[in-house]
Amino acid sequence: MKDIILVRAKKESDWVSCKSIVSNLEAAYLNAADVKISATIYFDSGLDEYDLHSLAQKLVQQEASELVFIDHKPHPGRLIAKLHQISPKYSPQLTFHIFGDFVLESAAWLELNPILQNYPVRFICASDKQKNLLDSFLNDTQVTTVIPFPVQKDIFYFDHKERSQVRQQLGLTDNDFLFLYTGRASLQKNVLELTRAMMNCASLLGNNLYFYFAGPFDDLCIPYKGFENPPGVYFQRWMKLSKSLDLQRIRYINNLEANELRRMCNAADCFISLSTHNDEDFGMSPAEALMCGLQTILSDWGGYGGFKKIMPEHTQLIPVSHQTMRILPDLALLQKKILMTFGNILTNEQREQLSRKATESLSVESVSKMLAKLSKTKSLSLFKGFNQDFTKLGLVFKSTPKAPFVAGKGDYSDYYFKIYQPYFQETVL
């Protein structure tokens, strides 16, 4: 039985999805069979040298066979460097759950590269496309594996009674069809483009089409190109657009807590998200919707494509491309998919079946089994390092961290398309 220490930040992430991911990963490890979690330690970026040394010394004294980093912040470089400094002969396996900010942190990973080669290393990616991206930077791709971020099945599940209750509260009839988006409302999430598409379809389909979206407004623009939004500007764009909408049928329903999100997922008929965010490594919102038995329409970008494997008959993917200095889904095809999906209200039995299937792949309990199985695999050899392509990436971020992928006239550089080629690839089952 492996003796494992989990490493996470004491201060929770500002990103709601990351808070859930870290908490759920910790629960998955604690419940994994034949895995002994001897401790969870907290590592924060504000540690001074004395506290950092003390923390590393504590790790050496415990002599765990594996250190598992389950948080995306802070970058583990300082702790691992200190660990190697005070005890070069202590060589536990280092396992990293990779989040969407891996590319953003490439300069820090590059700096850590020589030290990592003194340890066996495993990278756990949340999706196939993220694994393909990471593999393109490695001298040995055998050190990567795919295990999805887990979802709590006691929070996200299908309940037909709750569905009826919430729809009645919303004033929805059995013939009304509700599309739902949950997650951050921001430029790269393409929420306003989605709203306009819904507005166009509503004009064709009549009064039975509804679209609600929930989540915090986010002014993050396109940092990869150095583009920033003034505070509040994306919300102002929504307010301007909303003046042309029927706000009874196309509505913003604020930022909801987890239980409220489940209630809305149960009430809805289709989850839809067009995200082309640069760090869309997985997609907690689609995963939560799937756990509630919702059919989905998703952009075929990053981790989203992986959900097609879970529900191939009830997940529709929209290809993305480079358009007018943006990465956008095919909006014409999107509207066609909306028109085709409208009215296809799944029965309670179908929803329950889809929910069970998603739970078998995405729940904390299912991920626990995957982690237990992974722990029984043969030991890894020492890490063979990142390759020359990653060296270039790290140096690009080190030299131009605020606009690493900008080209002339503010468009994406050719280098961006080379790096993110795995995310653009069409999902094929």
Image (tube, rainbow, N blue to C red):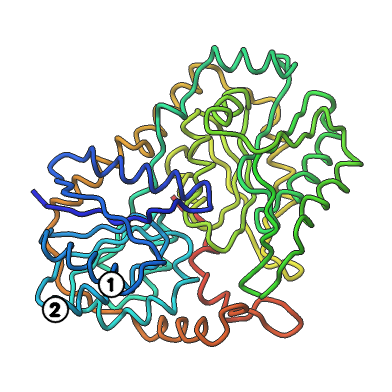
Alpha carbons under labels 2 and 1: distance apart: 19 Å
Q: Position of residue 283 (x, y in %)?
A: 51, 48
* Residue at 87%, 32% in the rendered image: 246
Relative to 44, say whether 164 is above or below.
above
Q: Position of residue 389 (x, y in %)?
A: 42, 83
- Say what amino acid the circle numbered 1 marks: Tyr
Secondary structure beneath label 1: helix
| Label 2 Cα crowd, 10 Å radius (few <14 / some 14-19 / many 20+) | few
Instruction: Please state which of the two labelled residues, at mark 2 or mark 1, is closer to the viewer.
Output: 1
Residue that lies at the very extreme toward the right in this rendered image: 244
| Label 1 Cα crowd, 10 Å radius (few <14 / some 14-19 / many 20+) | few
Who is closer to the viewer here, 334 or 25? 25
Q: Position of residue 271 (x, y in %)?
A: 61, 36
Relative to 340, say whether 195 is above or below.
below
**309 with respect to 187 (left or right):** left
Who is closer to the viewer here, 148 or 118? 118
Contact flag, marks 2 and 1 (Cβ < 8 Å): no
Relative to 216, say whether 247 is above or below.
above
Q: Position of residue 383 (x, y in %)?
A: 22, 75
* Residue at 23%, 41% in the rendered image: 30
* Residue at 56%, 53% in the rendered image: 300
Question: Which of the labelled discs sits on residue 50, or is there none?
Answer: 1
Q: Quadrant of residue 360?
A: top left
* Residue at 67%, 56% in the rendered image: 329
Q: Which residue is mark 2?
A: 88
Q: Quadrant of residue 70?
A: bottom left
**332 with respect to 216 (left or right):** right
Question: Which of the labelled discs sits on residue 68, or is there none?
Answer: none
Relative to 320, say whether 79 is above or below.
below
Secondary structure beneath label 2: loop
